[in-house]
Amino acid sequence: MRIYEAKDYQEMSRKAANILSAQIILKPDCVLGLATGSTPIGTYDQLVQWYEKGDLDFREVRTVNLDEYRGLDRGNDQSYYYFMHQHLFDRVNIVPENTNVPDGMEPDSEKECTRYEELIRSMGGVDIQLLGLGHNGHIGFNEPDSSFAKTTHCVDLTESTIEANKRFFASADDVPRQAYTMGIGTIMRAKKILLIVNGEAKADIVARALFGPITPEVPASVLQLHSDVVIVGDSAALAKIPRN
Ligand code: GLP
């Protein structure tokens, strides 16, 4: 586990974008595992800037997103499909057919989750998986649980996640109650993992996830077992990690 401390959100975003762009340059047809939420927005903005300068080329890049709300169609501005197009896909030369987000409108959850898991396998797996961190330690939408979910599955969102995500919706009642998400096993199969965290509100959960016991009650704690994890955090989010 390697931890980079950035002084603020902007520096965190640039460092994370640096790591992703290194991957794209080294392997132009790499598979990027992508994340949503407020944390990665600056990272995507930085990638777009480098693309506009001619320093990055997404023509052969393939992507798989972590998760999607169940029941939101692609045109809904709160869907993760919409988010990815708004913040990255529509701003660079990625081929739309090479981008993948779980289909939140597929009513048959087993069918969709199996399709998504097989898709990732057929692409040869994820070269680098970008992750944010939920306030309760969730990654993707893997909520605290009694066991680690192995593969892509349908989850019931916890009250704390609905509460945290209601800022994006008109009201808490509008937040979908379920989502399709890569499982912990799916995430752990990525060759590299890049976790980004910012803000003091994440400081407690960052310390618990990275230095506390490994338990499905804190889903991100499983990352301690991955052999190639990089964490990029701002000083506020890293304020409570042990210093020696
Ligand atoms: C959502 C997403 C996660 C994300 C988390 C944190 O629940 N499913 O992938 O990491 O929120 O969001 P934020 O970056 O806004 O704190």
Image (tube, grey):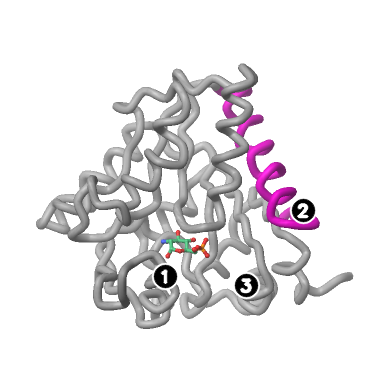
Disc 3 to disc 2, C-alpha distance: 16 Å
- Left or right relative to 53: residue 129: left
Question: Quarter-wise, where is residue 160 in the image?
Answer: bottom left
Disc 3 to disc 1, C-alpha distance: 17 Å
The residue that mark 2 highlights is 4
Q: Is residue 156 magenta?
A: no
Q: Is residue 18 magenta?
A: yes
Under circle 1, the secondary element is helix
Question: Quarter-wise, where is residue 62 in the image?
Answer: top left
Disc 1 to disc 2, C-alpha distance: 29 Å
Q: Position of residue 182 (x, y in %)?
A: 36, 55
Question: Quarter-wise, where is residue 159 in the image?
Answer: bottom left
- Left or right relative to 205: residue 62: left
- Which residue is painted at 64% across and 20% down in the image? 53
- Left or right relative to 46: residue 234: right
Front position in the image: 13 or 23: 13
Which quadrant of the rendered structure holds the C terminus?
bottom right
The residue that mark 3 highlights is 202
Q: Nearer the viewer, mark 1 or mark 2?
A: 1
Which segment is the magenta one?
Answer: 1-27
Q: Is mark 3 within 8 Å of ligand 1?
A: yes
Under circle 2, the secondary element is strand
Under circle 3, the secondary element is helix
The residue that mark 1 highlights is 167
- Circle nearer the N terminus (3, 2): 2
Residue 39 appearing in the image: yes
Q: Main secondary structure of the magenta part?
A: helix
Callout 2, which amino acid?
A: Tyr
- Which residue is painted at 46% across and 45% down in the image? 34
Callout 3, which amino acid?
A: Lys
- Which residue is painted at 54% across and 67% down in the image? 220
Q: Nearer the viewer, mark 3 or mark 1?
A: 1
